Amino acid sequence: MTQQLIFQSRLVAILRLDDLSAAAQIADTLIGAGIRALEFTLTNPESPSVIKSIRETNPAIRDGNAVIGLGSVRSLKEAKIAIDFGAQFLVSPILSVPIIEYCKQNKVAVCPGAFTPTEIALAWDAGADIIKVFPARALGPSYIRDVLAPMPYLKLMPTGGVDLKNIAQYLEAGAVAVGIGGQLLDPIALQNKDWNTVAKVAQQYVAACQMELTDECK
């Protein structure tokens, strides 16, 4: 289910926040705007307990219409914490085979990070569900197309430097999804709890991904 929601929406919202006091409201706003996959990151140690609470209380997540996961997972210990707290998918900035294997054993979707074609291939062979191509900022959409040319079966999710100006290019290049972080949440809007602005920006990204899906179906 997790992979299908990501494939359908083609968007993972990366929530790298120093302050998680409004995490539930942020999740409600983003999901209400149409985002279906939320990734809170372990750069804030409170993230595991936050995703546990949101998974238990958010209606869309409880009903299977959205999923919540933990990102910046860098060790097997952190992977165990993430799954213990109910993460429905794990995202890592690195390629760690033990993390992938542990997620597969526990039937939790895993998105390891990889940069080179060799790393990407190793991640896929180890059982990755989606491969986070990171940092994509230094690579660009043509890199995704070039990697997929000899390995079209890969499920790639470029992350880092993806925004409204280039999102269509990444999807046209063959990415199954994109990871959107800092561009998605305006710090001033968050500070002011301006949920209308947060929702409007999220809706723009959702529409950009869905527009590409619509074009492909024509």
Image (cartoon, rainbow, N blue to C red):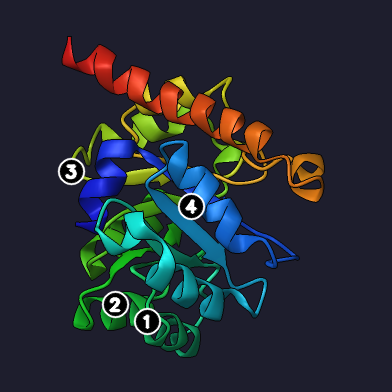
In the image: residue 164, left or right of residue 214: right
Q: Residue at x 82, y 41 (%)?
A: 188
Provide the secondary structure element on which disc 3 rests.
loop
Q: Earlier in the sequence, mark 1 or mark 3?
A: 1
| 68 to 98, vertically: above or below | above
Which residue is disc 1 drawn over?
83
Mark 2 nearby-residue class (10 Å; few <14, some 14–19, many ≥20): many
Image quadrant for the C terminus? Answer: top left
Q: Are marks 2 and 1 in contact (CB under 8 Å)?
A: yes
Residue neighbourhood size for the residue with mark 1, other residues' Cα within 10 Å, grouped as few (<14), some (14–19), many (≥20): many
- Residue 121 is left or right of residue 138, and the answer is left
Q: Circle 4 — which element?
A: loop
On the image, the x and y values in percent for residue 21 come to 70, 67
Return the residue at label 4. Answer: 115
Mark-to-mark CA distance, 2 and 1: 8 Å
Using the rendered view, name the quadrant where residue 112 is placed.
Answer: bottom left
> Which residue is painted at 35% across and 17% down in the image?
211
Labelled disc at residue 153? 3
State which mark lies toward you, 3 or 2. 2
The residue tagged 2 is 103
> What residue is rendered at 52% in x and 78% in y?
48
